[in-house]
C-alpha cells in the first residue's frame, strides 16, 4: 500500500463514492430516505462543516439521486462555498419562525408519510419526532465511515505526521516547572497556524490541536483537565496527549515520559503497559474480533496485577473525527477489516503514582497494521534530561 500524505479537500468522485455506498445499504434496508443530523456525517457526505446551534442542519439522502441539505438561509452561501459534489439546498429563514415557516415545515416538503426513513441513533429527539412516515434507527453512514478509502488513508497519514511533529515539540519543551496549559497554548497554536499556512484552502472550522503533558499528580486521571497552576515536575510519570483534526481528519499520539529520573514505583507498571500495548498491536489484524482483542489485553493486565487499574478500552477509531467507532472493546463483537483505523492505548492508572499510556493512530493493512504516528517508545528515550 502506497501512502501519500495529503491535506487536500475531497473531489466530487470521492464524495460520490461515499454517497453510493450509503445508497446501496439503504436499498438493502428498503429505505426511501436517510436523515442525518450528526455534523460529522454531514461533513463526510458533503465536505460542509459548521458548529451546531439552535438552527438545525439536516441532510436528506434519497434512495437514488442527489441529497438535499436543509439549512438556515443565513448559511446558504457558506454551504455553497464549501460543499463538494451534487447537493440540493433547501432553506428556512429562521428559528424560531412563524407557523408554517419552521424548519420542520420545509422537512415535510421532502419527506412524506409514506416514506421509510433511516435515522442515525444520535439524532436529536426534536428532529426524530418531526419526521413523517416510518422512522427507523440505523447508523448507515457511521458504518460506511469505518473502512477508509485510499484518499482518507492519505488524509489520516497527513494528520498523523502533523501531530507527531507537535508531540516531538512537546517533549523538547518539557522541563521542570513548565506550565501544562502554557505548553498547550504555545504548541497547539503553532500547529494550527502552520497547518493553515501550508494549506490555505483548509477549513479553519475543521482544524484543531491539543498538546498537553500532565504530571503524576494528574496523570492517573486521563480525562482530568489540569488547572492553571499545573506544572511538570522532576520524575514522573507524565502523560502526553497530542491530538487534533487536520482539515477535518483526526489522529492522536500519546506517551508516558519522565524528567531526570524514573521513580522506582513507576518501572513495573510502565513495562506492563508496554507489554499490553505490544499485544494490542499483535492482535489488531484483519479477521480478528475487536472484542477479543480488548479481552486478551485486559487478561494480560489482570495477570500482571493491574486489573483494577484500568479505566478504558484498548482503542477507538479515527476518521472525520478524532474519536469514533468502531472500538477495541470487550462485548463489541465485530470483525477487524483492512482499511480500519484504531488507537492502541491500553492504560494503567495508579493514584499516588500516576498514569501509564501510549497511543498511536494505527491503520489495519491487508496483512497486519501500520502506525501513522511516530514518537519515542523506550523508557530510555522517554527519560528526558531535567535541564533540557
Image: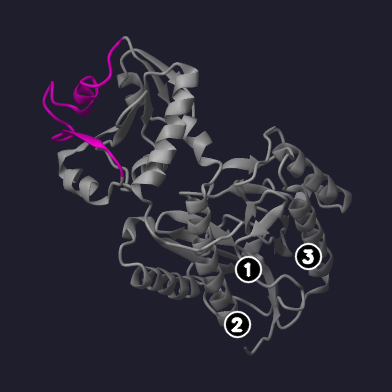
Q: CA distance from mark 3 to mark 2?
A: 20 Å
| Alpha carbon distance from label 1 to label 2 | 21 Å
Q: Earlier in the sequence, mark 1 or mark 2?
A: 2
Direction from residue 142 to residue 364 in the image, left or right: right
Q: Is residue 230 visible?
A: no
Above or below 24: residue 246:
below
Of all residues, the one furthest to the top in this rendering is: 114
The disc, 3 or 2, on the residue closer to the chain's N-terminal end is 2
**Percent from the top left, x then y, of residue 8?**
39, 59
Secondary element at image label 2: loop
Q: In whole angstroms, how far apart are the C-alphas of marks 3 and 1?
A: 19 Å
Residue beneath the point at 46% across and 27% down = 24
Which of the two marks, 3 or 2, is nearer to us in this view? 3
* Residue 314 image point, x, y percent: 69, 48
**Residue 256, horizontal then vertical, whole percent:** 68, 67
Q: Looking at the rendering, which quadrant does residue 31 occupy? A: top left
Residue mark closest to the camera, 1 vs 2: 1
Which residue has dot 3 on it?
270
Disc 1 is placed on an element classified as: loop
Amino acid at each position: 500500500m502506497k501512502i501519500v500524505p495529503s491535506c487536500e479537500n475531497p473531489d466530487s468522485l470521492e464524495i460520490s463514492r461515499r454517497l453510493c455506498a450509503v445508497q446501496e445499504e439503504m436499498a438493502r434496508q428498503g429505505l426511501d430516505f436517510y436523515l442525518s443530523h450528526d455534523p460529522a456525517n454531514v461533513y463526510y457526505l458533503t465536505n460542509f462543516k459548521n458548529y451546531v446551534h439552535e438552527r438545525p442542519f439536516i441532510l436528506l439522502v434519497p434512495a437514488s439521486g442527489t441529497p438535499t441539505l436543509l439549512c438556515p438561509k443565513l448559511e446558504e452561501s457558506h454551504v455553497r462555498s464549501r460543499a463538494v459534489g451534487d447537493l440540493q439546498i433547501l432553506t428556512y429563514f429562521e428559528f424560531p419562525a412563524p407557523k408554517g415557516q419552521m424548519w420542520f415545515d420545509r422537512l415535510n416538503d421532502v419527506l412524506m408519510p409514506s416514506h421509510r426513513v433511516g435515522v442515525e441513533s444520535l439524532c436529536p429527539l426534536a428532529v426524530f419526532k418531526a419526521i413523517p412516515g416510518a422512522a427507523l434507527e440505523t447508523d448507515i453512514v457511521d458504518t460506511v465511515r469505518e473502512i477508509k478509502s485510499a484518499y482518507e488513508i492519505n488524509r489520516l497519514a497527513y494528520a498523523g505526521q502533523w501531530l507527531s511533529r507537535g508531540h516531538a515539540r512537546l517533549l523538547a519543551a518539557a522541563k521542570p516547572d513548565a506550565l501544562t496549559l502554557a505548553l498547550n497554548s504555545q504548541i497547539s497554536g503553532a500547529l494550527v497556524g502552520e497547518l493553515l499556512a501550508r494549506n490555505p484552502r483548509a477549513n479553519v472550522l475543521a482544524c484543531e490541536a491539543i498538546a498537553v503533558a500532565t504530571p503524576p499528580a494528574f496523570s492517573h486521571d486521563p480525562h482530568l483537565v489540569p488547572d492553571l497552576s499545573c506544572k511538570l515536575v522532576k520524575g514522573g510519570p507524565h502523560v502526553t496527549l497530542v491530538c487534533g483534526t487536520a482539515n477535518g481528519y483526526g489522529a492522536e499520539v500519546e506517551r508516558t515520559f519522565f524528567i531526570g529520573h524514573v521513580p522506582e514505583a513507576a518501572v513495573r507498571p510502565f513495562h506492563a503497559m508496554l507489554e499490553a500495548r505490544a499485544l494490542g498491536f499483535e492482535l489488531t489484524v484483519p479477521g480478528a474480533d475487536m472484542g477479543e482483542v480488548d479481552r486478551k489485553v485486559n487478561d494480560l493486565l489482570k495477570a500482571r496485577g493491574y486489573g483494577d487499574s484500568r479505566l478504558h478500552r484498548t482503542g477507538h477509531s479515527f476518521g472525520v473525527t478524532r474519536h469514533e467507532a468502531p472500538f477495541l472493546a470487550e462485548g463489541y463483537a465485530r470483525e477487524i477489516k483492512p482499511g480500519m483505523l484504531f488507537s492502541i492505548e491500553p492504560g494503567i492508572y495508579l493514584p499516588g503514582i500516576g498514569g501509564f499510556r501510549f497511543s498511536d493512530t494505527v491503520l489495519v493493512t491487508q496483512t497486519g497494521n501500520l502506525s501513522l504516528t511516530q514518537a519515542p517508545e523506550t523508557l530510555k528515550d522517554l527519560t528526558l534530561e531535567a535541564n533540557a
